[in-house]
Image: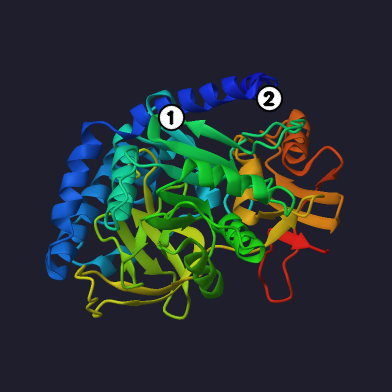
Amino acid sequence: MTKLQNIYDNSPIIIQNLIVSLSGFNKFNQRYGRIYFEHRKFLKEFESWEKEKKINYQLKKLNEFINFARKNSKFYKKLYSNIPDKPLNEINDLKRFPIITKEMIRENLDEIITIPKWKGIISHTGGTTGKSLEVVFTKEDVMRRMAMLDHFKSRFGFENRLMRRATFNGQHIVPPNQKNKIFWRYNISCKQMIYSSFHTSEENLKYYCESLNSFKPQSIDGFFSSIVDLASYIKRKKIKLKFKPIAIFPTSEKVLKEDKELIEEVFQCKVYDQYASSEGAPFITECEKGNLHIELSTGVFEFIDENSKEIVVTSFDTKGTPLIRYRIGDSIEAIDFNFNCSCGIQSPIVKEINGRTTDFLVTIDGVRINAGNVANLFKNLHNSVIKSQIVQVSKDNIIIKLVVDKRIYKKEYDNQLHDEFLHKFGSKMKIEIQHVEEIEKESSGKYRFIINRI
């Protein structure tokens, strides 16, 4: 646990709100500059283009991006040394370049990045595989990605920064020893109320409802499972809502049809899904007709081979840590290049996003903690975890299995990870950390990050 986290945990809630807002203002300055507003204007224009013009733009950006990586990244310059430096004539020409993996990024980050870390914005991800990963974005990368996300939401009438927003995420906003029932903190910089996804127990959900009825958010976003739990509680308890959001934008988890319908019934508004990643994958966004569009201005999706649903991604807005044919570990159902959606946006359509796991752990209070949220607990281990697996043996016993890079993993990281888990699952949870040489796969050949035996 960091010194700042310790100060936060021991401060009164009014000061915690101030700290959250100061952090929010810092991120605000990183995300909303000239590049952001210029790109918002471009995206509005790009949306009206015909598909052929968009594909030509995508190919142009792809060639520029590969040339940029060759010239500015030692890693790519070496990796592509035997590949002719000539323009790609079509997207399929990407196949002449090798696929890169999370492990390659983790081991070669200093040679992959194109700017010093201190000049960029560092993003940590645990990933749904539990492999700690660190990437560096340029400030322009971050602004363009935020512009895409905000442009997507604006299609349905929600304007980030200007409208009230409720977010369910995995931030450390509720200290482990807090006694009162306030499970949210306010980020004044963008009118955002942040709700803890770690405390949504049956006992506590009534307080969430009271807060939401008071705050009256114009959109709700964040972890899908937390929003589902909330919607289920509201329906079961017949709670009357005093607000109606413009839309709900889930993240980080697979959106299940029956749960989506429940949320839409309870909140009387539409749910719109989107796909991206902390590493910086290209975007897939849902339109008003319920179709999933590939955002061609953000990058390229390919299947790893013709018989697989697993994807590799090339993302244009990752100039700090270029992602070219990156094996991200997610999968999608089919890409239809010829479908003409009645929403008016001309772009390829994805049938379904399969990439996000629905595995979860359970706190002693019975709150489900999703895989994406659990994976975030590994993000500050400095690229030292190669693979991990979490086994919940009983309601009060969790085993953490780690395969680590022994060159850089430090003994104190065990204590750090132990504290992170206690912080999320409560002081009564028994946490056992085991260092292993390998983590066994299932009989199907698949690797599971979470095994829940209760």
Q: Which residue appears at 30% of the width and 33% of the height? A: 32
Is 167 left, or right, of 1 in this rendering? left
- Quadrant of the image containing the N terminus: top right
Q: Amino acid at mark 1?
A: Ile
What scheme was used to colour the molecule? rainbow
Q: Quadrant of residue 407?
A: top right
Q: What secondary structure is found at the residue carrying circle 1?
A: helix
Q: Amino acid at mark 2?
A: Asp
Which numbered disc covers residue 9? 2
Is 46 left, or right, of 73 in this rendering? left
Q: Residues within 10 Å of mark 1 (few under 14, many from 20)?
A: some
Name the one closer to the observer, 90 or 382. Answer: 382
Label 2 and label 1: CA atoms lie apart by 20 Å
Q: Contact (CB < 8 A) between labels 2 and 1? A: no
- Quadrant of the image containing the C terminus: bottom right
The percent coordinates of residue 355 (x first, y second) are 52, 65
The percent coordinates of residue 120 (x first, y second) are 39, 29
The percent coordinates of residue 432 (x first, y second) are 85, 44
